[in-house]
């Protein structure tokens, strides 16, 4: 005949063994475990006592933790606000900036010099704004002390305009052509680098751009150190005077 669907009330709270006996209960449990492998309640899997202990332990671990989507956890309106906030945070995350050591700066400047043949201040500022490819001028000055120190340590000069670079090279080229000697550019002497040096005549050539008018004392100290070391002559040329001389020369030739 069999029982109707569902358990009669007098079976409530009783185990399979109490209802069906040991052998039949074992067969029923095996049958159910095959059907509900990975499914079913804790009670069905472990029994009431053990199930209660597992639930208690799990509830302590997951206390305060919500699962599911933002919409399921907080509702549609609050979920939208949270997502918008997270999106703005991602936008404002700044890229990782490399440590601007002297070696890193030097390698970057060498790449610019190789590409352009000259390094201008405006190029540095432009590149520093493009994903921080190189640090800005103030960063370079902080690492080396000044742009002059940078030139002395690395032999790399940063110019305000191309005009300065052309004038220095023109002047040194003119001297080399007149004397017929090779002028060594950016020659290292006493931890300094001079603009030009003629080893045959033992003469140092220095071309003073605009910024040198603010460091006359430093230039004089440096010049005396070089003179004492090499017992050489030092010839200086000011950028403004050079421009005037060339202008007069061109006018006289005309």
Image (tube, helix red, strand yellow):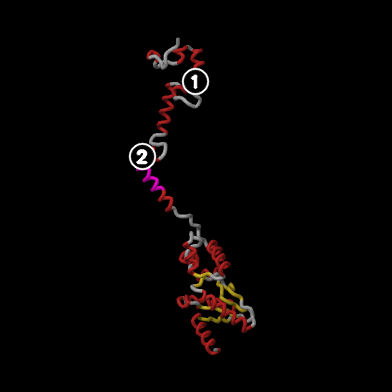
Rendering quarter of residue 65: top left
The answer to whether residue 231 is visible is no
- The total number of labels drawn is 2
Residue 81, magenta (yes or no): yes
What residue is pinned by disc 2?
Answer: 75
At 51% from the left edge and 85% from the top edge, which residue is drawn? 247
What residue is pinned by disc 1?
Answer: 32
Q: Are marks 1 and 2 in contact (CB under 8 Å)?
A: no
For marks 1 and 2 on the same chain, the one whose residue lies earlier in the sequence:
1
What secondary structure do most residues of the magenta stretch adopt? helix
Query: Where residue 44 appears, x then y in whole percent?
Result: 45, 22
Left or right: where does residue 226 sit relative to residue 11?
A: right
Distance from label 1 to label 2 (Cα)? 39 Å
Q: Secondary structure at mark 1?
A: helix
At 41% from the left edge and 25% from the top edge, which residue is drawn? 52
Residue 194 disc label:
none
Q: Secondary structure at mark 2?
A: loop
Query: Where residue 72 appears, x then y in whole percent?
Result: 39, 37
Left or right: where does residue 156 sit relative to residue 200?
A: left
Mark 2 crowd level (few <14, some 14–19, many ≥20, 10 Å Cα): few
Q: Give the magenta-colored segment's residue range.
A: 74-86
Can you say which quadrant of the picture contains the C terminus? Answer: bottom right
């Amino acid at each position: 005949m069999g029982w109707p669907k569902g358990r009669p009330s007098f079976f409530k709270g009783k185990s399979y063994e109490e209802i069906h006996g040991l052998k039949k209960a074992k067969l029923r449990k095996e049958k159910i475990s095959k059907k509900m492998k990975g499914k079913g309640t804790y009670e069905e899997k472990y029994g009431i006592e053990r199930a209660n202990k597992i639930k208690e332990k799990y509830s302590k671990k997951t206390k305060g933790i919500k699962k599911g989507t933002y919409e399921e956890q907080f509702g549609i309106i609050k979920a939208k606000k949270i997502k918008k906030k997270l999106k703005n945070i991602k936008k404002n995350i700044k890229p990782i900036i490399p440590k601007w050591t002297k070696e890193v700066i030097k390698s970057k400047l060498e790449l610019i010099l190789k590409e352009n043949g000259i390094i201008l201040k405006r190029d540095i500022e432009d590149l520093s704004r493009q994903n921080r490819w190189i640090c800005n001028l103030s960063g370079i000055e902080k690492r080396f002390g000044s742009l002059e120190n940078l030139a002395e340590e690395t032999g790399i000069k940063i110019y305000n305009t191309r005009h300065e670079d052309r004038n220095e090279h023109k002047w040194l080229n003119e001297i080399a052509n007149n004397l017929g000697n090779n002028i060594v550019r950016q020659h290292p002497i006493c931890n300094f680098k001079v603009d030009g040096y003629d080893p045959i005549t033992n003469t140092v050539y220095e071309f003073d751009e605009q910024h040198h008018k603010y460091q006359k004392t430093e230039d004089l100290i440096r010049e005396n150190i070089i003179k004492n070391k090499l017992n050489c002559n030092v010839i200086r040329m000011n950028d403004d005077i050079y421009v005037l001389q060339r202008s007069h020369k061109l006018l006289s030739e005309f």
